[in-house]
Amino acid sequence: MTALYGGSRSGKTFILVYALIIRASKVKSRHVIIRKTFSAVKRSIVFDTLPKVMSICFPNLTYEINKTDWFITLPNGSEIWFGGLDDKKRAEKILGMEFSTIYFNEASELDYSSIQIAISRLAEKNSLMKKIFFDFNPPTKAHWSYWLFIKKLDPLENEPLDEPELYGHLLMNPKDNVDNIDENYLKILERMPEKDRERFLLGLFGDSDDGSAYYAFDRERHVKETKKVPGTIFVTMDFNVNPMTASIMQYYNNTFYFHDEVFLENSDTYKMSDALIRKGYKGCKIIPDSTGSNRKTSGKSDHDILKDNGFTVMPTYNPFVTDRVNNVNRLFTENRVIINPKCKKLINDLEKVSWKANKLDQKTDTMLTHISDGLGYGLWKLDPISGKIGQRTHTEKR
């Protein structure tokens, strides 16, 4: 995989279209350029960058455009297709083919799950080495592109990549392309607000909006092997349908040890109960989101379902979100929380959850915040910030 990222008008797209034409000219083969919307790929690639690349770099190379299915054919029979993920019918047709190159244009607009599906079509049989290209203006550090190409961590598993050397990246900025852009455009970029200037002129990944929520968490200090000991096992839980989450912990030696987790998509409290029982945690003490006492994901209240399945549900009151997050950071700062490496979803949350407009960002990635919320409820129940016992009621929104 190769990613070209950086500021606006730095030549990223031009270079990757050029590389794709070179590959397609070598062997009869099929390639695809994908963007979030079909109208965008048609406007920016088919009618803009592609003609420029062909005119400047390949003036004698002819090609035909099929404007029904939207692909071009080169003289050797190679095809380059253009697709948008918003056009379901077109996307399904493209994903039914096999390709030698997949190029994700403006990849920061795409979610990682869609990219994974498309990559499965990189399977055309020929002599070409299969390639995946990306280009994008750098988003925030919470985005999957930062984790994949800069931190070399799998965005889903939050684990180091098996072959990190295969994930190359190159920073390209407008000042590297001054011969091909209007000098007044650089002045416009330089006058932008700081955040925009850093992104579109300097090609920097931004901080996660208003900042990392769990800034005190440090993978090197707080992720270690843990061992269950005789004594009480607590399950911290956040009630949600997608996902429903739970973390299994013990408290001893003045330290919280998180041994295990359950992360269920499109689920309910019955399925969570079954999952905990299968893992051997029946009868444990549940420290839940207090809203579960009146929230019903499955008919009965979530708390009642857990009780019916043999769990002890501890009474809780949700603190204010800022108090809960501050409490988590306090305990990490004191090195009193240890998380087992197998708790991948929890670690992922602690590293990626950020503030946005004074709230935890639950919109950028809807899978985030839930399992770390549960951790926060557990830590608050057993060791709250001194003087913060006057907690809010469970009827208030979190």
Image (spheres, rainbow, N blue to C red):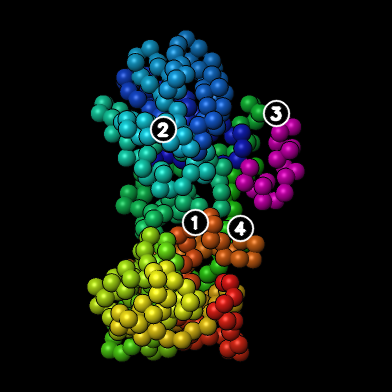
Note whether 14 is above or below 28 in the view shown: below
Which residue is the site of mark 2? Answer: 89
Q: Is residue 366 left or right of residue 160?
A: right
Foreground of the two, 256 or 2:
256
Which residue is the site of mark 1? Answer: 365
Q: For mark 1, give the secondary structure.
A: loop
| Magenta residues (range) | 183-200
Note whether 322 is above or below 61 in the view shown: below
Foreground of the two, 238 or 21:
238
Q: Earlier in the sequence, mark 3 or mark 2?
A: 2
Tell me the crowding category of disc 2: few under 14, some 14 to 19, or many 20 or more residues within 10 angstroms, Cα based.
few
- At 24% from the left and 73% from the top, the residue drawn is 278
How many numbered badges does the structure rendering display? Answer: 4
User: Where is residue 291 shown, x and y percent of the image?
Assistant: 50, 76
User: Where is residue 29 shown, x and y percent of the image?
Assistant: 32, 23
Which residue is the site of mark 4? Answer: 209
- At 25% from the left and 28% from the top, the residue drawn is 125
Q: Is residue 167 left or right of residue 7?
A: left
